[in-house]
Amino acid sequence: MGCSKLRTELVPGIPAARGNARSACSLVRVVTVACMGAVAMLLLGCRMDMHIQPKYLPYEPTDFFGDGRSERQPVPGTVARGQLRLDELMFSGRENGVVVDKFPFPITQADLNRGRERYNIYCTPCHDYSGTGRGMIVQRGFPQPPSYHIQRLRDAPAGHFFEVMTNGFGAMYSYAARVEPADRWRIAAYIRVLQLSRNATIQDVPEADRQKLTQQSAGQASGQSMGQSQ
């Protein structure tokens, strides 16, 4: 209600005294401000209830439970969805408790490509790109791992490499939290590729490709002899 209108309505037909009108206007303003303040506090209170929620953060202590922990332990035997690891070979590299030299799924070219990618990301800092154990952090003082090309590791079963990546070995920590099981097997397959590439012979090459290599070698030898004669 406007102050001028209020002034005329205080005493109908008689102009209100200036002091009374001023007092009435002040009262209106006070009531308006009080109402706006109450609404603001109400809204602010609602926002704070949602903004600062009555909850426990992870690992926050509490005296509500007897053990002083806010989290509850899962029911014994609880397994997360998709984590029921019944395939012993796939998730341990073993069969009947024995480390085996085979893979839990057929290794394709796509698997080898994926294995090379994962190997280059996670393994080369120590083992380098060729698997000799002279990675960059080894050159800077980290203990050198054995080369994949020594006889002991050439004879090691594929499950051994999976097991080492899963559990760690010596100065190497576990990569189970970084590399999923299928990718660990792909890395193991790529390690086999590195071992074969370092120790392969001409007899390991298919016959059709062997002839091409023989021709290339003969051509290179001929070119070198011509260069030396000149």
Image: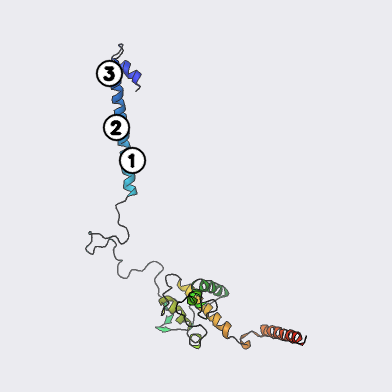
Real-space Cα separation, disc 3 to disc 1, in angstroms: 35 Å
| Image vertical order of residue 21 relative to residue 35, above or below | above
Q: Position of residue 71 (x, y in %)?
A: 29, 62
Q: As shown in the figure, which amino acid type bears the numbered disc 2?
A: Ala
| Image vertical order of residue 177 relative to residue 146, above or below | above
**Residue for badge 2:** 34
Query: Could you say which quadrant of the image residue 36 lies in?
Result: top left
User: In the image, which is nearer the foreground, mark 3 or mark 1?
Assistant: 3
Dot placed on the residue nearer the N-terminal end, 3 or 1: 3
Q: Position of residue 12 (x, y in %)?
A: 30, 13
Dot placed on the residue nearer the N-terminal end, 3 or 2: 3
Q: Is residue 90 left or right of residue 222?
A: left
Real-space Cα separation, disc 2 to disc 1, in angstroms: 14 Å
**Residue for badge 1:** 43
| Image vertical order of residue 75 relative to residue 101, above or below | above
Q: Indicate the quadrant containing the N terminus: top left, top right, bottom left or bottom right.
A: top left
Q: Position of residue 218 (x, y in %)?
A: 72, 86
Dot placed on the residue nearer the N-terminal end, 2 or 1: 2
**Residue for badge 3:** 20
Q: As shown in the figure, which amino acid type bears the numbered disc 3?
A: Asn
Real-space Cα separation, disc 3 to disc 2, in angstroms: 21 Å
Q: Look at 34% across and 44% down and name the residue there.
A: 47
Q: Look at 31% across and 39% down and name the residue there.
A: 41
Residue 89 in view, yes or no: no
